[in-house]
Amino acid sequence: MLPFSEALKKIMEQCHALPVTTLPLNKLNGSVTAEAIKTILPLPRFDNSAVDGYGVKFADLNTATEETPVKLKIVGEIAAGQAADFELDQTGTALRIFTGARVPESVEAVVMREYCHENDGYVHIDCEVQKGANIRIHGAEFAQGAEVIKARTRITPPVVGLLATLGHANFAVHAKPKVSLVITGDELISPGLPLADSQIYDSNSFALEAALTDLGISECKKFYARDNREQTREAFRLAFLASDVVLSSGGVSVGDKDYVKEILEELSVETIFWRIAMKPGKPVFFGTYKKSGNHSRGLVFGLPGNPVSVLVTYHQLVKPALLSLMGLKEKTNQNQTMVLKGALKKKAGRLDFIRAKIQVNSDGVSAAIPSSKQDSHMMTGLTGADCLIHFDIDAEELHDGQKITSTPINWHG
Ligand code: AMP
Ligand code: MG
């Protein structure tokens, strides 16, 4: 069986950033920049005050002490958004100035209002100031034309803020993949409906939909198939027409009612692999299909049916692929070294991803505590987990206190 790292490599080889599209500011979060962000304006754009206070000449405050405050005549006021129409052209004068207001050239420092006392058109200041104090100099953060964010960077709320600061109403990003879900299983019924004997609620479609939403893919189409060839074929056929990526749930193992692999082959899917030496996730299928009206190929993942398996394989295999299609170059799922709390045993042959909770010890070392519910149908083993311990393919024992590799669980990226 294919080792996990080989499987991931084969998946990533099939992933190419989707074409560039332009989105408005309120749709950009979570997308990946298709070009570098350059400062089309210097930042700050003009000299402005960092505080509410009084603009002064440096020399006027030379003699200020608590016992002998300096008294300056207020010759004007500048608020945020107003033109800096006043200058300090005489000694002994000051300007009332507000946070964000333009600071005229003749002002050499702004004294915070808290250190001043105003009376009868004069301000009394009893402390010295540094030259340039509380003035945000234009271009101090970045000169005009500087590259501040590289192409292929994930857009986060501060990046949206930066784009808006620079005046971009929209920006070029890689398109997000259109994803469809094919949910198989005779036993499934939608949550909210009454359960008949032997039925269970479909949880995978909702869990996958939630995972996609966390990645910034807010819409996915769902196609349901009972465990027969016709419905499975029709569900995949429609999903292929609608999507860049198709994720199926269940029916991909070796049972008599597992039609996914057979139908995918029938639909001319190019099989890249079927089955991985990992647990959970052994039956995962991965292939590519011809997209309608398009030269590029779509990706199809046949994920297992067990609810924990579907989410673990999504996290470890599908999420990196989706981020790569979205244009992200950096590797996702960066592993960390932690210390195991407890002991584990297994048979050699598969890489086990053990659901675990991270606890940071008093010495700053992260310890991973395996969840007590490790079966692939036990969702609570995953709900309380924040990392996946790698129990290596050939290993049969892990000891308490041993160093281990683990992947922090992150649904966002
Ligand atoms: P399968 O791979 O189709 O044999 O499914 C494996 C296990 O996962 C079975 O116990 C199924 O009942 C369960 N399962 C399959 N699909 C879903 C689903 N959408 N929601 C919840 N459980 C499922
Ligand atoms: Mg099934």
Image (spheres, rainbow, N blue to C red):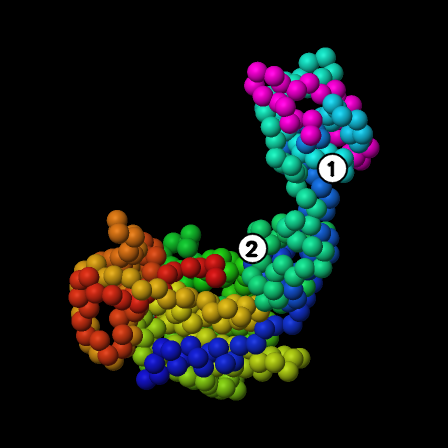
Q: Nearer the viewer, residue 211 or 120?
A: 120
Q: Is residue 351 left or right of residue 243?
A: left
* Location of residue 194 by image quarter: bottom left
* Location of residue 144 by image quarter: bottom right
Image quarter hosting the N terminus:
bottom left
Q: Position of residue 225 (x, y in %)?
A: 46, 71
Q: Is residue 285 above or below residue 71?
A: below
Q: Position of residue 385 (x, y in %)?
A: 32, 57
Residue 61 within the segment the image draws in magenta: yes
Q: Position of residue 23 (x, y in %)?
A: 68, 59
Instruction: State the SS at label 2.
Output: loop
Q: Nearer the viewer, residue 246 or 37?
A: 37
Can you identify the residue that label 1 sits on? Answer: 102
At horizontal 57% and vertical 63% (from top left) the residue drawn is 153
Q: Is residue 396 above or below residue 199?
A: below
At horizontal 74% and vertical 20% (from top left) the residue drawn is 73
Amino acid at the residue labelled 2? Thr
Can you identify the residue that label 2 sits on? Answer: 156
Circle 2 crowding by C-alpha within 10 Å: few under 14, some 14–19, many from 20: some
At horizontal 64% and vertical 50% (from top left) the residue drawn is 141
- Which portion, as a residue range, is magenta? 59-86
Q: CA distance from mark 2 to mark 1?
A: 30 Å
On whether ligand 1 comes within 8 Å of the CB at mark 2, the answer is: no
- Marks 2 and 1: which is nearer the front? 1
Amino acid at the residue labelled 1? Arg
Instruction: State the SS at label 1.
Output: loop
